[in-house]
Image: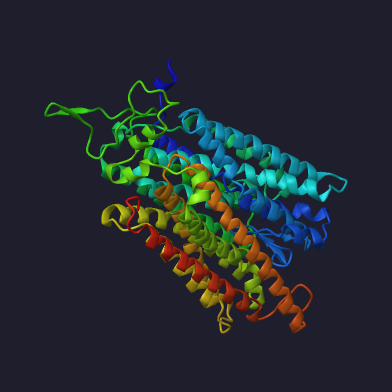
Amino acid sequence: MPRHHAKKVNKFVTLAVSVLVALNGGVSYAYGLWAPLLKRHGLDQRDVAILGGSSTSDTMRPTQYSTYGRRAHPLTPVSCPCLVAAHTGFGAYSSFIAGILYDKMERRQHVGPRLTLLVGCLVSSVGFFLLQRAISSETPVPFPLLVCAAIVAGNGCTYFDVSPISTNIRNFPTTRGWVIGIIKSSIGLSGGLYSIVFFQGMFHGDSAAFLRFLCWGPSTLVLFCVPFVNYVPYRQESERCARTNARRFQCAVVVIGVLALYVMGVSMVRGMMDVTPHLQGVLAVGALVFLMPLFGITFDSGGLFAKKEEEEEVGGEVEAGAGAEVEVEAGADEHEGDEGVETALLAPDDEANASSHSLRHCLLASPEFYMLGAATGIGIGSGLTFLNNSPQIVGSLGGSGQEQTIVVAFFSCASCFGRLGFGAASETVTRRYKISRVWFLILAAAGSALVFSMLSVECLASPTALYPLSLISGLFFGGHWAVMPNLASDLHGLTSFASIYSVLQLFGGVIAYVLATYVGQSYDAIGRAQGDPPGKCIGPQCFTGSFRKISALCFLGFVLSVALWRRTRFSRRL
């Protein structure tokens, strides 16, 4: 059977399975769960300063936290942050490798998305295996080898982000905002779910067993999903009714939103009280139960395989259903017709996207690319800075461990809703009212500047005052993650989307590195000047000066967003 006649898996089945893949794409967020194992490897401050990354030894005191608010065991002051930097910074933000691979295979509708996932499974397993072997070694492992293993492990997860999001926005080009919000929020939830289902529910807090599981668990789960992920180059019969399609997306949004609330609730309960092993198992099963309704989006969608929308003869001419995309010629080989495939994907109001930009063009001849990267990078980097320093912020204000847990949980949950909300709202408003999607970037940038302006006020002396600010900060942090891939596809098309989207993520990683280093040094300097105990800083002034400068940086992001709107306001793409 010729490859271009091979059956394609239903788009909605691909979307549902892609969410499962994405829930394995943020395993690097769970670094706090196995970080206590690093205590046996003593690393000096020089190594920490070299790597820095999203956290430094000065900004992770006194206790390491996971992204979803679970308090881990106390760590040595230097070992964990360095690996966190390598794992979440250099590894997780180097997704351009996965993006370039995906785009190289873009014409292969079956092979491309699946091969990218398979490579991700291999890289992830190898990375975590090397990391586990290095950490469990009885003899000290050279620092560079430990870092390399962490980078490989972190990079493996990026394939589980790039392939699902790139495949599904090509499957649903006219509703890409919904798709991006759903998948990006799933990636954000993955660390929390791994903590509830596996770390607590299966291994009962055993960090060594959990790290061994990471060597094969995520890859095995993704391997089961690989056969169901593919690109469908035509409109399905089940896509005829726009209202039904919208309800399917809304169903997915509700499921992810409820799951985010559940994860937040469980994180807060675990942070405030001891949970018995029996209850941990119940909570793990509860997370899976809340996830199961996701497959409701596949009901009445035509079965496992995609069915092409039948053409109807009207007045002697052949027409497709209202608003349908035109399929590539039936006999066309899937390895050909790069521009034709994308033109076929786009609705009439998206025809401007048919002329896509390459990554080379973006890097060498597109000011909009750098404006978008800098604006979203500032929003993402500043949000990560608040998240990574939130335990120290609460501690400097005299807050307890419970209050630290609540702040982190609020931020994480709000981040999920920010990704869902900005993705869905930008799609609805853009389609219905013809308003540029850049306005949502402007809104997110303005919100980030407002949050850090409020954090820089020294009269903010109560930890409870951080609760609403953590919600707002998380909301706009998630909004930046949703808007960035949307605007990347709007500005530069879909043909090279994976590599462009991946490179744009580097902006956030670099800015987070710089901000984390600056905030950590400022925190230490103020603590020493006040005569506080070594490694500590007490009082609101510990962070207000740093946040004042970050608020100015966020205002620069706002200015860049407005400038991007001015450059693109007459573009048919937006």
Residue extending farthest to the top is 1
Provide residue 392's location: percent of width, then percent of height. 66, 70
Q: Where 10 falls versus 257 (above or below)? A: above
How is the protein colored in the picture? rainbow
Q: Quadrant of residue 309?
A: top left
Q: Is residue 388 visible?
A: yes
Q: Where 49 falls versus 172 (above or below)? A: below
Q: Residue at x 55, y 70 (%)?
A: 553
Q: How many marks?
A: 0
Q: Residue at x 38, y 33 (%)?
A: 341
Residue extending farthest to the front is 365
Provide residue 412's location: percent of width, then percent of height. 53, 60
Instruction: Please identify the quadrant where the N terminus is shown.
Output: top left
Q: Residue at x 79, y 44 (%)?
A: 134
Q: Where 331 falls versus 225 (above or below)? A: above
Q: Is residue 255 visible?
A: no
> Nearest the camera: 536 or 263?
536
> Nearest the camera: 276 or 30?
30
Describe residue 511's horizontal placement relative to residue 210 as left or right: left
Provide residue 91's location: percent of width, then percent of height. 65, 48
> Nearest the camera: 410 or 541?
541
Residue extending farthest to the right is 139
Provide residue 454's location: percent of width, then percent of height. 51, 77
